[in-house]
Amino acid sequence: MSTAPTSIGAIAAGPGRTVYIETYGCQMNVSDSELILGVLADRGYAAVAEPSRADVILLNTCAIRENAETRVARRVGQLISERRSTRRVRIGLAGCMAQHHRDRLLERIPGLDFVVGPDGYRRLADLLEADEPAIAVQLDRRETYADILPMRERGVRAWVTIMRGCDRFCTFCVVPFVRGRERSLPPDVLGEELVRVASEGFREVVLLGQTVNSYRHGETGFGELLRMACDVQGIERVRFTSPHPADFDDATIAALGECPKLGAYIHLPLQSGSDSVLESMQRGHTLDEYRRLVARLRAAVPSLALSTDIIVGYPGETDDDFEATSRVMDDIGFDHAFLFKYSPREGTRSFRLEETVDETAKGERLERLIAEQQARSLRINRQMIGRTTEVLVESSPKKQPDWLSGKNAQFKTVAFEPAGPTGARHGELASVLVEAATSQTLSGREIGRA
Ligand code: 5AD
Ligand code: SF4
């Protein structure tokens, strides 16, 4: 849910055909950047890790809130102004913000060379060869890129997109407009992809989709797909993001309870703890339904960690509505929460609603939820002290290069002192005795291989 840019590492480059990508927004965009590199690799392009070495600079953008767009507008302006005229460097925007503003971007940002939306990536290489600024923003309800091999950065965790688009049209959200209608990839294609990522050394897969648990292709639903992913040899953990609360079916909950490889963590957006706000947002469920779902998920997976998304200051949100959100977050006991101020998005249904919560009040509500969540996360994480947890090792903490770190089943970051030569290495599971906790991380020492 972060909007921090991520860049994709370097591979061998051909002359005149190097590309640098900066990715903003959600994990779908991280996965799409890998897809874009896959599309461009077929046309002889290779990734570089710095914009100064690139023939093509592409920002893969987010449109979810206004500040995500402001940041990209500033960054692309900076890249264009730094461009030297000694060789041809094409600079462009891809993804949700590109789709949201389309040709207006070429008018507003002088020097921009191309604009490509989430369904236009097959045309990207052609756009790059055009003499004039070029654009591909046609949405295509069948495009799944099922035949494109993404160029993944090596590591422990692989992102695998299983469905694209969204049909829910929550009133505040621009996603259905910029990513188009929902479509799922065929299970046989996904099966091959999962075997490939396992053979490439990835040990964890995260199945991705805007409403990932509404996956359906023919007879195959999300529950079956989860079981299929868990059956792939070499994959130790299977996760998914983001599910919609109204899309959990019995088959999915049964799979969660029965497949030990499924991580004990679900990101379950709630948005508001008030029924009237949920209804106004057209989320498709009540608070009580959400609570009952949480109870079923926890019954299936007793060690389940939960995170959520909350929007404060939605039009019409009263003090009482806000207090209800604060209370519900405490009742449910979320391990983590992504908290946002409502941002009106052109084209959405709530854009036409009058804003009733001013910036100051939004800021105060946000700050309060942040403080409450921090205390709650700390309290929950401290309960782990003295217990053992299984960590899939992925890196070393920056400040402690002789330690190791990774995520446990609950998707918490755990840093630990390794057991030495007999201990787990990158891509292996370590048993760690937790000795300390903050609101963000656990730490301890390895007591053996898991
Ligand atoms: N304003 C604020 N937050 C938003 N989100 C989506 N649209 C908006 C908006 N207009 C949040 C929701 C969603 C998350 C990805 O971003 O909480 O779950
Ligand atoms: Fe946006 Fe709602 Fe779709 Fe999520 S389910 S992407 S919030 S419209």
Image (tube, rainbow, N blue to C red):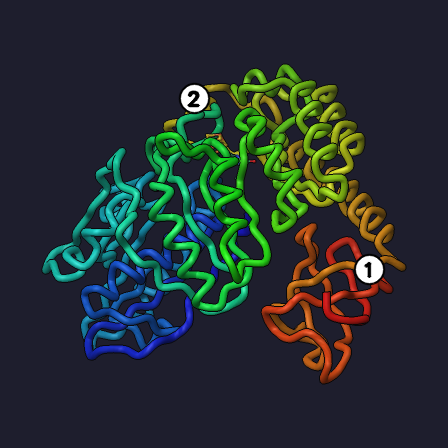
Question: In the rendered view, would you say 51 is above or below 389?
Answer: below
Q: Is residue 151 visible?
A: yes
Disc 1: CA contacts within 10 A as few (<14), some (14-19) or many (>=20): some
Of 95 and 434, which appears nearest the observer?
Answer: 434
* Mark positioned earlier in the residue sequence (2 or 1): 2
Question: In the rendered view, would you say 38 is above or below 189?
Answer: below
Image quadrant where one finds the C terminus: bottom right
Q: What amino acid type should be assigned to the residue bearing mark 2? A: Arg
Task: Kindly identify which residue carries mark 2.
Answer: 349
Q: What amino acid type should be assigned to the residue bearing mark 1? A: Thr
Residue at disc 2, secondary structure: helix
User: Is 361 left, or right, of 221 in this rendering?
Assistant: right
Identified at 13% across, 62% down, the residue is 129
Q: In which image quadrant can residue 35 be found?
A: bottom left
**Residue 434: x percent and y percent?**
83, 62
Identified at 45% across, 33% down, the residue is 221
Of 427 and 35, which appears nearest the observer?
Answer: 427
Residue at disc 1, secondary structure: strand
Q: Is residue 311 visible?
A: no
Identified at 43% across, 54% down, the residue is 194
Task: Kindly identify which residue carries mark 1.
Answer: 388
